[in-house]
Image: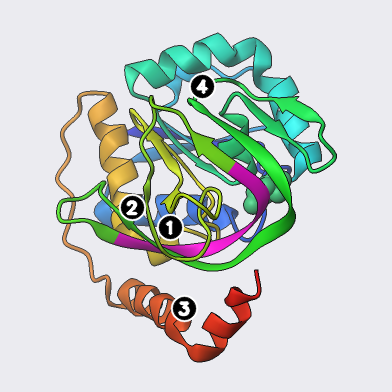
Amino acid sequence: MVKINIYYLYPDHLNLYGDRGNIIALCRRAGWHGLPFNLVSVHPGDRINFAKCDLLFMGSGQEYEQKMAVNALKERRDALLEAVERGMVILAIGGSYQLLGRYYTTVRGVRLPGLDILDLHTEAGRKRMIGNIVIRSALWDPPRTLVGFENHAGRTHLGPSVKPLGEVIHGHGNNGADKTEGAVYNNVIGTYLHGALLPKNPWLTDYLLQKAIAYRSQQFAFKSLDESMELQAHRAAIQLTRSPWHKLRSSRF
Ligand code: GLN
């Protein structure tokens, strides 16, 4: 019988700006599709067996939590990289996205080493990048929009081994300069989109679940679900970024 194992990393520490809504969306949508799954919460000090994990969710955290997470994971870094190379699915938000890279330099100039899983690095700037964000992602053909909320000091710069998750239509994105947002490597997705991300972007939820099913070479037919409420929320988020007030407020950056 098809079943996937969803691992929720450090739920008590990595959860900024509604990130735990992503785990709720993954579990609810798997249930609506009739896809059996296990949800495993992983706490600092737990030994993670990545061989059993199909989909790892990492919420966001500030510098203290980022340091804690790297220290707790660093001895498992090679096992994590092996799982990533095999195709294990990861969704990493904000600070977790940053810590999968080579390093994160804080606004005080302190360099926090990352897990060096993704070819990217992050340098914090003085002004935080805050606001609603809309990107266009080529994960799909034709591309689809993804909406969320960003709040980060980090400016993330991608290396040649990763692709951006999308192109910024409205907002700051990775660094407020190169119009990229997020990073994709194999089945790993890192992004600054909080909100939570998945409830307003059900196609990304299904994308992650389908990749987790395929990771175990399993077959499973998804149902055609009523997405009217999610679409309404998605469109409202896009509409919000088009309001004159929003343009004025976000232009102050
Ligand atoms: N501390 C990181 C930053 O400010 C993470 C922020 C976030 O996760 N949104 O860039």
Image position of 125 (left or right of 208): right
Closer-to-camera residue (250/68):
250
- How far across and how far down the image is residue 227, in percent? 27, 70
Q: Pinpoint residue 139: horizontal percent, then vertical percent.
A: 26, 46
Q: Amino acid at mark 4?
A: Ile
Q: Amino acid at mark 2?
A: Leu
Q: Is residue 230 magenta?
A: no
Residue 72 drawn above or below residue 219: above
Is disc 1 in contact with disc 3, using a CB cutoff of under 8 Å? no
Contact (Cβ within 8 Å) of mark 2 with mark 1:
yes
For residue 79, side relative to residue 70 (left or right): left
Q: CA distance from mark 4 to mark 3?
A: 33 Å
Mark 2 highlights which residue? Answer: 204
Residue shown at the point (34%, 80%) measured from the top left: 232
Helix, strand or loop under label 2 = helix
Q: Which residues are magenta?
A: 145-155
The disc placed on residue 198 is 1
